[in-house]
Image: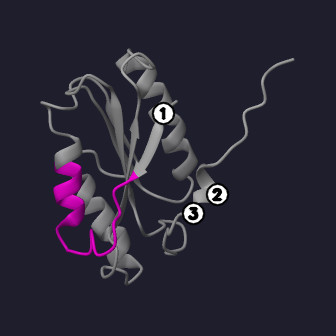
Amino acid sequence: MAIIKTANTKGKYYESHAKEDVIRYILNLFKARTYCGAYGVDTNNPAQSMEMISAQFGKSHGVQLRHFIVSFYPDEVNSPMTANEIAQQFVAFFANEYQVVYAIHEDKPHLHIHIVINSVSYVDGHRYYGTRAEFKSEYVAPS
């Protein structure tokens, strides 16, 4: 079963350059060799696109982004294409309100997905805080 981690520890990602730094890290070609994507941003400069939305709503202070990592066990998901399909499900979850950038990292024995969302909604400027309940779901086996 995949593990979802948040990289949003207290006091992290408040700096003005946080979006640029994290997006540069997740899109690193030595880690993200095959699949990456974005929603609601200029793909030539996603961090700047996110900055523009934050500034538009007067929220260039505080937590700048949310960073999630979805890690798979080595034998759980072996295909970057499958990991990309899963990543697109996460993007669809956030994309109705937030700008998103993601990448599939293939630099470890286990595939993992990095997802970065702008903490400010492009719809109405509210902040994303995230709750555990958002990530819990029940799986009902077919009968």
Residue receiving disc 2: 133
Marks 1/3: CA–CA distance: 18 Å
Residues at circles 3 and 2 in contact by the CB criterion of under 8 Å: yes
**Residue denoted by label 1:** 2
Task: Report the residue that reaches farthest toward the right.
Answer: 143
Of the pair 25 and 42, the residue shown nearer to us: 25
User: Residue 17, percent across and down?
Assistant: 17, 68
Q: Is residue 46 left or right of residue 28?
A: right
The residue that mark 3 highlights is 131
Compare marks 1 and 3 and give the one earlier in the sequence: 1
Which amino acid, by three-letter code, is at mark 2? Ala
Residue projecting furthest to the left: 30
108 vs 123, left or right, is left
Q: Which residues are magenta?
A: 6-24
Residue sitting at x 20%, y 74%: 15
The Cα–Cα distance between marks 3 and 2, rounded to whole angstroms, is 5 Å
Residue at 48% of width from left, 43% of height from top? 91
- Crowding at label 1, few (<14), some or many (≥20) Cα neighbours within 10 Å? few
| Quadrant holding the C terminus | top right
